[in-house]
Amino acid sequence: MKIIILADDDIIAGVPRSRGEVVAVADSYGDNIRRVIAEHVEQRNRQAVEAKIEKVKGRKREEIFREALAKLIAILQADYSQFWAALQKRPAVQDAIIQEMRENPDILRRAIEDPQWFVDEVTKRFKPNGGQGNNRNAK
């Protein structure tokens, strides 16, 4: 579909139209056009609708993420208070973990299902070399 300005009076889809009137016509309409205002209107509309849907989905994902993160924080505060206090002293570690969770929501999901796993994994980050220790000389 395209939107045009008619060059002369015409009948379009059984409706009389006047010269200079702005009307929507099929893409194949080629006569009596003074000017084309927009082409492929339905495609543009579809793209605009899809973009709006994605924006809403993005907001919904963010909302779900925040709710899940709040749930994890509540679990950590209640059941792992020493760990939570230690984590609060390391904002860089916190930020890195949250970013990883945003990129891979399965980490957050697993952390809620198995908080001990999460505590163990994050505790490794508190230690030098990511919890590897100094095992270079061990054989």
Image (tube, helix red, strand yellow):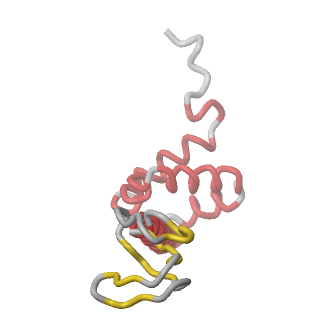
Q: Residue 75 placed where, x, y %?
A: 46, 70
Specify whether residue 57 is in view: no
Quadrant where the N terminus sits is bottom left
Residue 112: percent from the left, percent from the top?
A: 39, 63
Residue at 35% of width from left, 69% of height from top?
26
**Looking at the image, which is closer to me, 86 or 24?**
24
Position of residue 96 in the picture relative to residue 115 (left or right): right
Which residue in the rendered view is the most extreme toward the left?
14
* Residue 121 visible in the snapshot: yes
Q: Quadrant of residue 61?
A: bottom left
Residue at x 61% of width, y 22% of height: 134
Q: Which of the pair 79/75 is nearer the observer?
A: 75
| Residue visible at 63% across and 44% down in the picture | 126
Residue at the spot x=33%, y=90% of the render?
Answer: 15
Asked if residue 89 is positioned above or below residue 61 in the image, the reply reads above
In this view, 84 is above or below 135: below
Instruction: Give left or right: position of 57 versus 126.
Output: left
- The relative height of residue 111 versus residue 26 in the rendered view (above or below) is above
Residue 33 in the image, given as x and y percentages of width and height: 49, 70
Q: How many marks?
A: 0
Q: In the image, is residue 17 above or below residue 122?
A: below
Residue 63 location in percent, x, y? 49, 74
Question: Image quarter for residue 46?
Answer: bottom left
Farthest residue toward the front?
8
